[in-house]
């Protein structure tokens, strides 16, 4: 609705994990570097955790775009199925031909694929998102896959991505062997307060916004106070703020517009009333 008014090529504040809008905050760069190191060094199992909306899935998609042709990948976004189905998804995503679908045949097909890729000088990475939803049997199956190795290196790199509950699950006594195999860990944190304006301007610039479109210092302050730096929450507020500015036919998003947006999101609760604008 507001795209033409602000000269936008696309919506700058979608909550989808679009790598073209990747903002290289300090913490996101650190997360990316941890992942890249774990893959290139063939560390086996890598764990990335973070609260909802901190950008874990975006990091994964960024990683896929940067890995290059020598790294074969599988991305499992919603592993809400059995351990057998998990293997079937991995085989399918890696493009492995496999006529039978039982567990023994699937693991054997994956092993042959890994040996072949290693002989060609390639690496293989499986990224599994929302791992806090995996059960013990599924996680144990992942551990068994991580056993596929030569005398010198891991043939398969497995990235487990999830909310902080994933760490609690890995600390389960039944998964101690898997937990001991985790070589690289990183916990995603929200954006720093000093990064909020740069984050917003980065997304606006990427979408081709009119240069007259600005957020006031007070608006930025209110956005941080409400979002605490969580990118997804920032996107939700800013999307509504652009709509509010469009309705008022203004290119300046001030504290009052942000206060109204927060009320729309949560209603006039104790958390939002403190952001009410007073003229």
Image (spheres, grey):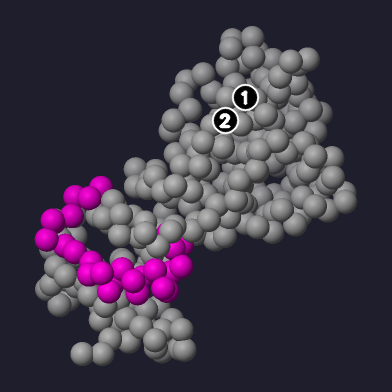
User: In the structure shown, which secondary structural element does the residue marked by tag 1 occupy?
Assistant: loop
**Residue 59 or 38: which is nearer the viewer?**
38
Residue 218 on the magenta segment: yes
Mark drawn on residue 37: 2
Query: Where, by quadrant of the figure, is residue 155 drawn?
Result: top right
User: Is the residue 169 above or below the residue 269 in the image?
Assistant: above
Tell me where residue 197 appears, x and y as whole percent: 30, 60
In the picture shown, does residue 237 fall above or below 185? Answer: below
The circle on residue 12 is: none
Q: Which residues are magenta?
A: 205-231
Relative horizontal placement of residue 78, taking residue 149 as reference (left or right): left
Q: Image point 13% across, 56% down: which residue?
A: 211
The reply to whether callout 2 and callout 1 are in contact (CB within 8 Å) is yes
- Mark 2: few, some, or many residues within 10 Å (few <14, many ≥20)? some
Where residue 220 sits: x, y (%)? 31, 68
Of 1 and 46, the residue lying toward us: 46
| Residue beneath the point at 30% across and 54% down | 198
72 to the left or right of 17: right
Where does label 1 land, which residue? Answer: 41
Which quadrant is home to the C terminus?
A: bottom left
Residue at 71% across / 23% down in the picture? 154
């Amino acid at each position: 609705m507001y795209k033409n008014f602000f000269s936008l090529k696309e919506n700058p504040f979608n909550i989808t994990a679009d790598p073209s809008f990747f903002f290289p905050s300090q913490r996101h760069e650190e997360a990316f570097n941890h992942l890249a190191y774990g893959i290139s060094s063939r560390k086996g199992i890598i764990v990335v955790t973070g609260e909802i909306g901190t950008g874990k899935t975006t990091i994964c998609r960024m990683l896929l775009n940067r890995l290059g042709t020598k790294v074969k990948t599988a991305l499992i976004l919603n592993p809400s199925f059995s351990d057998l189905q998990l293997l079937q998804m991995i085989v399918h995503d890696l493009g492995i031909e496999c006529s039978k679908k039982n567990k023994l045949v699937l693991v054997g097909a994956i092993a042959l694929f890994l040996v072949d890729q290693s002989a060609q000088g390639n690496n293989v990475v499986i990224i599994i998102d929302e791992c806090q939803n995996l059960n013990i049997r599924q996680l144990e199956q992942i551990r068994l896959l991580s056993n596929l190795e030569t005398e010198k290196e891991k043939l398969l790199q497995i990235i487990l991505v999830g909310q902080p509950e994933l760490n609690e699950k890995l600390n389960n006594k039944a998964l101690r062997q898997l937990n001991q195999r985790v070589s690289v860990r990183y916990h995603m944190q929200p954006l720093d307060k000093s990064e909020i304006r740069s984050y917003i301007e980065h997304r606006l610039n990427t979408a081709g916004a009119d240069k007259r479109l600005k957020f006031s210092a007070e608006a930025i302050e209110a956005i941080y106070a409400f979002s605490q730096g969580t990118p997804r929450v920032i996107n939700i507020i800013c999307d509504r703020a652009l709509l509010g500015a469009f309705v008022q036919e203004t290119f300046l998003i001030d504290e009052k517009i942000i206060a109204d947006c927060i009320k729309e999101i949560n209603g006039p609760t104790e958390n939002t009333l403190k952001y009410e604008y007073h003229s």
